[in-house]
Image: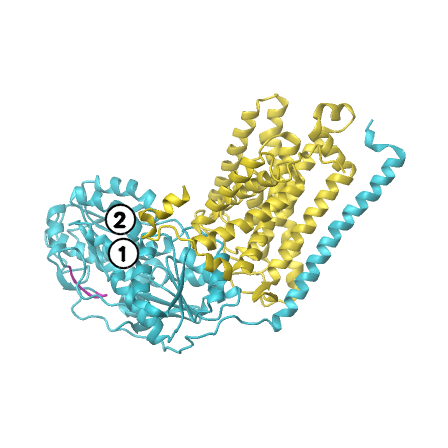
Chain colours: A cyan, B yellow
Amino acid sequence: MNPFAGGKKSEGNHMIRKKALAGVATAAAALVLLAGCANQTGTTGGSTSTGGGKVNIPAVTSVETPKDAVLPAGDGKGKCPSTTTIAYIGAETGPNAQLGINIFNGIQLAVNQHNQANPDCQVQFKKFDTEGDPNKATGPVTQAVNEADIVGVVGLPFSGESKATGNIFEQQGLVHITPSATNPGLTKNGWTTFYRGLGNDAQQGPAAAKFLTDTLKAKKVYLVQDDSDYGIGLAGTTSAALGSALVGTDKVTTGQKDFSATISKILNAKPDAVYYSGYYAEGAPFDQQLVNKGYTGVFVGPDGVKDDQFIKLAGDASKNAYFTCPCIPGELLTDFEKQYKSLASADPGTYSIEGYDAATVLLSGIDAGKQTRADLLSWVKSYDKDGLSKHYKWDSTGELQAPAVYGYKVQDGKIAYIGPIGQ
Amino acid sequence: MLELVLSGPFLDNSWINFDVNALVQNFWSATFDGLTFGAVYGLIAVGYTLVYGVLSLINFAHSEVFIVGAYGVVITLTSLGFGPSAPTLGPLAIIGDLLLAMVVGMIEAALTALFIERVAYRPLRKRNAPRLAFLITAIGMSFAIQYTIFLLQGPLGGPSGANAMPSITMFVQHPVFDVFGTLIYDVQLIIIAAAVILMVATDLFIRRGRTGRGIRAVAQDPDTATLMGVNKERIIMITFVLGGLLAGAAALFYVMLVPSGVIYNGGFILGVKAFAAAVLGGIGNVRGALLGGLLLGVIANYGQILLGDAQWADVVSFVVLVLVLLIRPEGILGQTLGRSRA
């Protein structure tokens, strides 16, 4: 028999149980009441930021397609063995995968156009997934460099993984063009196989600073950086250029979800603008939580944040966002936009056109008979032609000569181009 | 030690740097943010504490009980039309939806806890397996559930497994009042108050009720309790369900705070923190779980602001945990469930 079930006692217990139930009911009631109060304060809720940077910058809706740009189709007379392969190595999955998807779709488009126009040169295209993670990148890179048929690579997209794997390419003499890694230090490793297909953060940082203080007229800028090589490097060049406009800095980590400590520091500093040096996976929830806590200033992020995913993840909070990027808007080049759309059933994203251009550099080399790793490497080294996005000519370290930085903003739930910045 | 590091060459590179000024400036907001997160840790910690109290077993899969609850909350809210942008509903509709999401989260978490007990622990108990075996199955269960979510998330219509579920903004947060120049937000008050009320209710349930007495009896001496007519298996099930219900409630509050935090492995670090909270307060002690949670939340926030880098938050909180345990190995309140008589 259950000793707890005795006469008098059970009565007492019954009462207590009632009490406990009442407690739970009170809890629910209190929750409802509190939430009710909370919602009423909605109409009177104060704002905490001074709200600077409310400058209306018109969107630019067309960009001229360069006339002399080299296209992947070439003259249609390319000849190569059917095993000739170029590869994309970078994120296909992972938290920042969209940036990688934009790139390999651009490459796929270039390869398709090339193969269609050159019946005697069917270049194969292989993809290797790094998840954008420096710790996981060495595996796929090693695998790729050991495939002798791969003569050229587009990648790796991110700075951290590029830094971690540059030596492997160097040892195997395999040329690779990054369409998007912007950390300035990458070209200071003495690598001869690394080429950067865009401007770096030594240009983007000062351009972003100038954009913040001159164009957006922000007097107080708060800078937040993540812990990636990219975020740290860009934060360094940006804060140096911001000078006295910089009122505070804070650090977040890759994979962080809760930004309350950083946000309370920002709200206390009352900046006109927040510059986030990192990727959209953290940037989007950060902006969302920032705006949700009453921040009314602008949010500026670099190329790592500039993606439709940012808007999708942050929702309405993204209305306060601007982006800086050493990339041109591929969606405004009508032909490219149409072709890309029919392949990927989506608009070209950030770095789609840079991926396309980088692939074109490699494909035109293959058509010109440079079909070994050594030949293709020297082809890229002496390359000096226009692409769709810019003129491609590298210096001895693998940096482009005279790259530019461009501005973007969020308008009607989309990313709109606002022209070159920082000049 | 710290002296040594600080006076070394690292100082010039600002490897570590104590921003006392920032902590002073942000003291109250850090405190309230910390208490809010601490309340969530505390609610999850009860699950660890109860199971430990009754079975002397660390249920490492409890973090998955929580994350399944969080998926329940997010899926419910998404299907009710919530998304990354703030909803345009009236306050009553929002509260109704949130309560519904909470109930779904609680039920799913409780069912998961029950499932884990059935599949991973009961068969071992029947065979008198050694303690270590329970620990291993717990970890195994934890991974099994994590990767089941990872694999199913994409095919079932969510984003691919490596990505978090779409974020949910339940309502726009508003400052309710001002403490020494720091705005206190409605969401913070709701979470702290709700957590405290739920904890008090749980505490009362265990201290006063008949089932509660059964739980304490089994915790104290399972064999004697069985001889006295307590249905041990039933008590164990109730213990798991109770922990699951609170984890489900915690899931709603967590999504309020961190709208984009629902990812297959998102429970892991939270589970570790909640477990630490349970140990800090005194494992096996329900009040200790709340106290430990609140303390841990606040300490982590102070640490992060003091050292200016989110990576320090966990370092600081776990160093404090170690220091406390060095002085008081049984935790701050240090009672076991069995001895906590009303």
Q: Residues within 10 Å of mark 1 (few under 14, many from 20)?
A: many
Q: Amino acid at mark 2?
A: Lys
Question: Which residue corresponds to the image point at 56% horizontal and 36% vertical from the top-left?
Answer: B327
Question: Which residue corresponds to the image point at 43% horizontal and 47% vertical from the top-left?
Answer: B162
Could you tell me how far apart the alpha carbons at marks 1 and 2 are, in whole angstroms? Answer: 9 Å
Residue marked by disc 2: A163
Q: Disc 1 is attached to a residue of which chain?
A: A
In the image: residue B155, left or right of residue A305: right
**Magenta residues (range):** A388-394
Question: Which residue corresponds to the image point at 46% horizontal and 64% vertical from the top-left?
Answer: A266
Residue marked by disc 1: A183
Query: Residue B214 at what x, y percent from top left?
Result: 75, 33
SS category of the residue bearing label 2 = helix
Q: Quadrant of the N terminus of chain B?
A: top left
Query: Residue B248 at what x, y percent from top left?
Result: 62, 47
Q: Residues within 10 Å of mark 2 (few under 14, many from 20)?
A: some
Query: Residue A1 at what x, y percent from top left?
Result: 83, 26
User: Which one is nearer the viewer's eye here, B71 or B208?
Assistant: B208
Q: Disc 2 is attached to a residue of which chain?
A: A
Q: Quadrant of the C terminus of chain B?
A: top right
Q: Amino acid at mark 1?
A: Asn
**Is residue A392 located in the magenta-colored stretch of the structure?**
yes
The image's mark for residue B32 is none
Q: Report if residue A313 is visible in the image.
A: no
Tell whether label 2 touches label 1 (CB within 8 Å).
yes
Mark 1 and mark 2 lie on one chain; the one further toward the N terminus is: 2
User: Which one is nearer the viewer's eye here, B236 or B162?
Assistant: B236
